[in-house]
Structure formats: C-alpha cells, structure tokens
Amino acid sequence: MLLTTELSGPRPGLDGLDEVAALADEAVASGDTGPFYQALRASELPYLLKHYRDDPHGLLLATVTALHTIGARSPGLALGVSQHLSSMLAFGIGRSVLSGDDAAGKVVRGLLDETFDRRLLIANTTSQGGGSTIGASGSRIVDAGGAFRVDGHSTYMSLATEADKVVFLTYDAGRNPVGVVTDLRGNPALQVAGDLLFGDHLVLADTRRLTFAGLEVPPESVFGPDPTLNAFYSLQLMCHNLCVAALYLGGGHRILEETAQHGRSTTLPSGEPLSRSDSFAANVGRVAISYTNSLDLILAQAPTFRDLATADVLDAGGVARGLLRVSTAKYTVAKNVETIAAEGRKLIGARTFMQDHPVARIGAEVVFAALGPATEKLIERNFGTRYLEAEGGK
Ligand SMILES: Cc1cc2nc3c(=O)[nH]c(=O)nc-3n(C[C@H](O)[C@H](O)[C@H](O)COP(=O)(O)OP(=O)(O)OC[C@H]3O[C@@H](n4cnc5c(N)ncnc54)[C@H](O)[C@@H]3O)c2cc1C
C-alpha cells in the first residue's frame, strides 16, 4: 500500500498479523472477542520482545505496525491490545533499568519469563484519574508485616477481562509511587467491575474499574519506592503515547481507504466515477496529507527511543524530554485523526451512519485518542510552560 510502505514488509514476529486482523473484523461484527484473543495469543504479536531482544528499533517498528493494523479494524480493540504491547515495548526500551539485580529487575524478569512461557496478556493501570480531585491517587499500599496490603481503586483498566495479570502503580504513605505485579483473576480482593467504564462508546477496549479490597501481595511482587524507577514509569508513558498514536492512526487510515473506495465505486450524474472529479481528488488529497504527515511524525520518534534503549543508564532528564516530545507527537496525531474522521464523514455523506458503516464507528472511537493516556490540555500546559520558561523557547 502506497502510504504505509514504511510499516509494511516482513518483520520477525508479524507472521500472524493478517489472521489476527481478519478476526478483529469478526470481533467487530459479532461483539465476541474470544476467537480474536485466541489467535492473538497463538501468534507472536504479544511476545515480539522475544524476537527483538537486541533490536529495540525493530521492536518499536513491529509494535507500531501491529497496532496500526489492528487499529484499522477497531481502535477500541487495538487500545485493549496496546496495554500489553506498550508494556512489552517499555521493557524492551528500558532494558538498562531491568537488567539489574534489584527488586524491579527481578520482578520484571520473572514476569516476562512467565508471560512468554504461559502466553499471558498483561493489563496495566495507574490508580489515578477519574476521581473528584485531579491527580489524586485512588489507592495506597501499606507494609502489613511480611506482606503488603493494597486498598482503594484504579479507575481505568483496559483489556480488563482478557488480561491474566496486571502491573499497577499505587502509592505509599509518603505519596511515593510503588509498582505491583499480581494475577488478575481468582482473587476476591481484586475486583474487576462488571460495568464498562465508557458504556457503549468504546466497548472493545474493555475498560473497567479495578477495586483493591485488602489485596495482599508478597514482597517479591512489589518494586519501589525507588527514584530510578520514576524514569521507567515515564518511559512507559512514552511507549503508551506512541502506541496510542499508532493505533488511532490505523483508524484514520481505514477512514481514508473507505473514502477512496467510495469515490471509486460511486458514479457522478455525468457517468464518470466520483474519484475522477478534481474536487473529490483534492479533498482526498487533504485527508491523505494529514495521514502521511501523522505517520511521518510517529516514525520520527524512533531515534528518541533508540537513544534511551542504547544508554547504559536510563537518564531521568532524557526520558522527561522524550516524554514531552512523544506526547506532543501523539497530541498532533490525535488532532489529525479527528480531522480525518470528520472529513471522511463529510466526503462519504449520510450513508456513513447506515448499517454500522466503519467510518461512523471508527470515527466515534478515535475521539478517545485525545483523552488517553494523557489529556490534550495537560500536554498543551506542559509544552507551554516549558516553552515560556526557556528563554526564546529554546
Ligand atoms: C479509553 C481510555 C482507556 C484507558 N485505559 C487505561 C489503562 O488501561 N490503564 C491506565 O493506566 N490508564 C488508562 N486510561 C487513563 C489514561 O491513561 C489517563 O490517565 C486518564 O485518561 C487521565 O485521567 P482523566 O481522563 O480522568 O483526566 P484528569 O487527569 O482527571 O483530568 C481531567 C481534565 O482536567 C484537566 N486538568 C487535569 N490536570 C490539570 C492541571 N494540572 N491543570 C489544568 N487542567 C488540568 C484536563 O483538561 C483534563 O482533561 C484510559 C483512558 C481512556 C480515555
């Protein structure tokens, strides 16, 4: 395909992508994600890290390709999958932190071994957001002598009923972030809400509230508080932002393709195909330019990740600069995709709202790109503050 050349072509671990994408179409049509997740686990897509241990750049491109492709079927479904894939990307890029013999290195290496052996899927959540006080943590962890105890809730957890394990951030009494890895099922003290958080709006992302009701976790499942880990948490957010941009842009690509197809298959009163009219070509050109620029912007983030992956230590300043950069890329891609969705609807017309047309459905899903994993307003504020603080905006 002309516009996706840089994401196409064979790559290790992507063999099953076409089959998984076809089953994503079926999941959208039936609402049943069972066969999709079965094929996903049987494929190497969730375990790409095994194939790219010494090639973080290859891991990044393969991850972006997988999420863009699934996002073209449903950004919501891809958002669920991205919870696992973006963690794997963060483990691949932040390998200098995780190769150590400290608690974090041991916990994550154990998690990865188990994930690869048992072909698991991992959700993650931060315990923040959604409450009446912005930025407040919804949960806390205390040392209960021999084990740790977690109480409270986390508002947002996608992939909620499919994942086997969850990696979550909670806070200790001193408001320091602490990481916990635990099984997601079979523990009455860990409750996944029956209700979807976003109702009908983003069903396939399977985003739900997680409640910790006196959850006991052994010390070997807990890492932090540790200042060096804060850089890793920011790296994980960088990976999320890149993944979110890629999967929603996949939705944008689908809208562009559907628009082009509409032009080719619709005939003007003159008998000419709509796609031959100059105005339609120019309109499609405008949408295609937004798509191409967005893809270039995503791929332009690769050197930032490569620098972090090849450094001997994960430098907090480098990650902070990287996060700001990747966040602004995600911000621009999210805006472009919303524009692509609005333009696609106008070019195809009212029939986009008939019979679950993919342009209306995907268009409704892409509005979430602006909200997760960091809201537009926060990205604007962060960028504006730093610009104002730096003399001449340097
Ligand atoms: C579809 C979806 C799925 C998600 N899935 C997951 C998941 O699986 N795991 C996970 O960890 N998270 C997930 N998230 C959460 C996401 O990563 C963000 O943490 C979350 O969206 C931010 O919280 P909030 O939307 O409640 O915004 P808040 O942080 O509560 O902010 C609300 C609004 O207040 C404004 N605001 C906030 N702070 C400031 C400030 N300091 N100054 C001025 N204005 C401010 C902003 O305009 C913002 O939009 C998901 C989010 C979405 C939308």
Image (cartoon, helix red, strand yellow):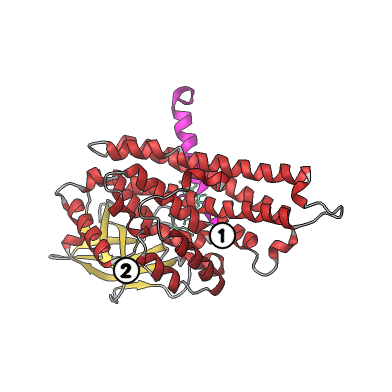
Q: Nearer the viewer, residue 257 or 186?
A: 257
**What residue appears at the point 24 percent right and 64 percent down from the top-left corner?**
117
Beta carbon of the mark 1 residue lies under 8 A of ligand 1: no
Q: Amino acid at mark 2?
A: Asp
> Magenta span has 117?
no
The numbered dot on residue 164 is 2
Q: Is residue 132 above or below residue 209?
A: above
Instruction: Classify mark 2: residues with Cα within 10 Å, few (<14), some (14-19) or many (20+).
Output: some
Beta carbon of the mark 2 residue lies under 8 A of ligand 1: no
Q: Residue furthest top?
A: 392
Q: Nearer the viewer, residue 131 or 196?
A: 196
Quarter of image, res 314: top left
Quarter of image, res 123: bottom left
Label 2 element class:
loop
The numbered dot on residue 365 is 1
Instruction: Classify mark 1: residues with Cα within 10 Å, few (<14), some (14-19) or many (20+).
Output: many
Q: Nearer the viewer, residue 291 or 233?
A: 291
Q: Position of residue 374 (x, y in %)?
A: 46, 49
**What residue appears at the point 44 percent right and 33 percent down from the top-left corner?**
386
| Residue 125 visible in the snapshot | no
Q: Is residue 286 above or below residue 268?
A: above
**What residue appears at the point 19 percent right and 47 percent down from the top-left corner?**
99
Image side of residue 78 versus residue 163, left or right: right
Q: Position of residue 170 (x, y in %)?
A: 30, 58
Q: How many marks?
A: 2
Quarter of image, res 234: top left
Query: Where does the magenta region start and end?
Result: 367-394
User: Principal SS element in the magenta part?
Assistant: helix
> Magenta span has 377?
yes
Q: Position of residue 316 (x, y in %)?
A: 30, 38
